[in-house]
Image (spheres, rainbow, N blue to C red):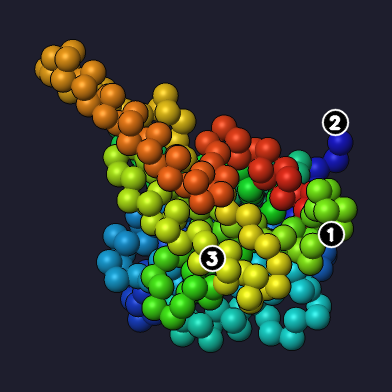
Amino acid sequence: MPDRLPCEFALIRYVPDVVKGEFVNIGVLLRPAGAPAAATVLRFTRDWARVRCMDTEADIALFEALEAEIADRLRLGDADTKPVLQLLEDTLSNSLQISEPRAVLADNLADELDQLMRLYVEPIRVRHDRRRTGRAALQAALRTEFERAGVWSMMRRRIAASTYTRPGDPMKLDCGYKAIAHRNEAEGTPPDGLIRIFQTVSLEGDIEGAKGLAWAAPRLREGVRRVEQTDLELTAIVEPLRSLSIGREDNERDDDAVATESNEATDRYRFGVEAMEREAIRVITIADLARAAETARHELGL
């Protein structure tokens, strides 16, 4: 059996009231003992229920943006002159704190990070928890696959569409990256870094997200060409058609009513997919995410 890797980890805590000193763990920093900052892996929770219980006005979007900024600073390693702890203190006035480092032996960093998140951060799951549905389920699957591929921390998240469209555009796009290893085989020349952006679109109960993304696609492409001087590939992640939950929770409805609603849901689903594909949006399901994540690994040079 190979020797286990000596590591050290620290917990990132949210402390809404520093006078009371009550806190909730929201993330983990983990790195091999003695390794530089660039070797550190970081993960924040995906379930903010405990944070909201402690502070109903907590700015979750700020936490998610901060996770990306911390990961960027860690990748800079010794070239970054501002320690992570100081960044946290400056950002939220001690509302985010880092615990003292603790030693741990790990088989590998990815599995150990999963274990530490389960032990110290994630809420205990009970059998009757409601199943995630809609965009929440799609976003969780998206993040899981890109984390497994080791590229989540290298991606831009919650990308403001207004960067490419116009000020005031409220749309936020889930994540994206610049494909540094991309080659345009049709033209025989490499573009200056194709931009790939991924957006989860739930077609289970409402297709407004699909219509909105289809409407925005031409403006996003035009803006990417203007701002980034390159092309945009926009990908929508949707549920598989077979996963639609029409009629599953109401046993008292007659078969004809369930069949009618199922047919209507199928028509809406196909309408949403076709609306996006007409605007050259690549539509994939969660079953295709592993392949997309592996492509990201290659195109980000890993």
Tell me how far mark 2 sits from mark 3, CA to CA. Answer: 52 Å
The residue closer to the viewer here, 238 or 219, is 219
Name the residue carrying label 2.
Answer: 1
Name the residue carrying label 1.
Answer: 190
Q: Is residue 297 left or right of residue 48?
A: right
Can residue 131 be seen by looking at this rendering?
Answer: no
Please state which amino acid type lies under the numbered disc 3: Leu
Q: Which residue does the image show at 37% across and 62% down from the upper left? A: 51
Q: Is tag 3's residue or tag 1's residue first in the polypeptide sequence?
A: 1
CA neighbours of label 3 inside 10 A, class few (<14), some (14 to 19), many (20+): many
Position of residue 22 relative to residue 131, above or below, is: below
Position of residue 98 relative to residue 125, above or below, is: below
In the image, which disc is placed on residue 220? 3
Quarter of the image with the N terminus is top right
CA neighbours of label 1 inside 10 A, class few (<14), some (14 to 19), many (20+): some
CA neighbours of label 2 inside 10 A, class few (<14), some (14 to 19), many (20+): few
Secondary structure beneath disc 1? loop
Secondary structure beneath disc 2? loop
The location of residue 45, given as percent across then percent down, is: 49, 55
Front: mark 2 or 3 = 3
Front: mark 1 or 2 = 1
In the image, which disc is placed on residue 243? none
Q: Is residue 235 left or right of residue 16?
A: right
